[in-house]
Image (cartoon, helix red, strand yellow):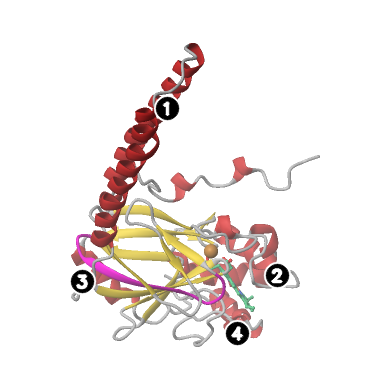
Amino acid sequence: MEAVLDIADWPSALDLFGSQSTLDPAGLGAAEVYPLTVWMTWAFGAVFVLVMAFVLLAWLRRHPARPWWIWAGGIVLPLVAIVAVLVFSTAALVATTREDPDALIVDVTGHQFWWDVVYDPEGLALRDANELVLPEGRAVTLRLTTADVIHSFWVPSIAGKMDMIPGRTNVLTVTATETGRFRGQCAEFCGLSHPLMAFEVTVLPAEDFDAWLETTRGEARDAARPSLLDGRETFIREGCPACHEIRGVAEGGRLGPDLTRLGARPSLGAGMWRMNQGNVAGWIADVQDMKPGAQMPSYNHLSGPELRNLSAWLVSLR
Ligand code: HEC
Ligand SMILES: [Cu+2]
């Protein structure tokens, strides 16, 4: 039987994004967690080797164990090890969840299977999706929640992991310390397309970040050609605004990602496909084939030209 989806055809995560690794910290939170990972691996590796050595010893020489061994190895050693882990991990937890009153606030809301992002919700209220742009060296307070089931926000290279829980807002303050592109991933099983719920993090130098906010906050770019205008009309006629907002074209749709700057995102479908017109057209025509379980209807009744103009207009938005 032929495989329906050949993994080898999928874009590699590392092609699309930068690093997704706790062993390659590029943020204060991740830098806090990294030494814990290293020390715990060594310390418990040593305990494992020790225990295996005792097992071997017991096998080879069958004399009865001395009681103090049981006290030392069975009670004192685990107690010391667990208390040490508790102390170091609590210190890391306190350091990674410390709030900063001057931090920029960004609301991130998990949806099946994408991310809604609002920068400076009480001021600028700039809405975007499936990408998080951060300033280098500046603290950003993420207010994390969900629109449906439990998700978990995790950018391993930048910070620790935080759950997104219905009816609750969890706060995670992150400070990226390197510019570049990193990959985030939903880390809590949330339905059929859970493993395909990723996003990218772009860390810009702080000045560039301010400029980015300034240029991104406006309305979507005007349709410059008649074919693009036609694409915009199809978008409205087909009812896409019921779920998608495009500032200056159709506002208020919140059931799907904001598309105001779709063409500027490096990936389509929350970190799944490369952003290009062909993939966008394929997405609209048969979304279940592109991302099984996505909560968007397929538009396979559109004619070739309709699909072509609609997808060309969408990728022209940046
Ligand atoms: C019932 C609500 C709904 C309707 C109607 C709808 N969509 Fe969607 N759309 C979604 C959802 C939900 C997603 C996110 C899917 C995912 O990634 O899991 C999405 C994702 C997308 C994406 C990818 C966005 C990104 O950030 O990668 C594009 C492009 C898109 N839709 C275009 C359209 C177009 C064009 C139409 C109209 C022809 C349309 N949608 C109609 C709900 C909808
Ligand atoms: Cu999820």
Cβ atoms at labels 3 and 4 below 8 Å apart: no
Q: Earlier in the sequence, mark 4 or mark 2?
A: 4
Position of residue 60 measured from the top left corner of the image (x, y, whole percent): 49, 12
Residue positioned 70% across, 67% down in the render: 304
Magenta region: which residues?
136-149
Q: CA distance from mark 2 to mark 3?
A: 44 Å
Residue 181 shows in this picture: yes
Q: Residues within 10 Å of mark 3 (few under 14, many from 20)?
A: few
- Give whichever of 238, 15 is nearer the camera: 15
Find disc 1 in the rendering and name its residue. Answer: 51
In this view, the mark in front (3 or 4): 3
Q: CA distance from mark 4 to mark 1?
A: 61 Å
In this view, the mark in front (3 or 1): 1
Find disc 3 in the rendering and name its residue. Answer: 100
Q: Earlier in the sequence, mark 3 or mark 4?
A: 3
Find disc 4 in the rendering and name its residue. Answer: 242
Q: Residues within 10 Å of mark 2 (few under 14, many from 20)?
A: some
Position of residue 312 measured from the top left corner of the image (x, y, whole percent): 55, 68
> Which secondary structure, mark 2?
loop
Query: What kind of residue is marked 4?
Result: Ala
Magenta stretch holds residue 11? no
Query: What kind of residue is marked 1?
Result: Val
Q: Which quadrant holds the N terminus?
A: top right
> Which secondary structure, mark 4?
helix
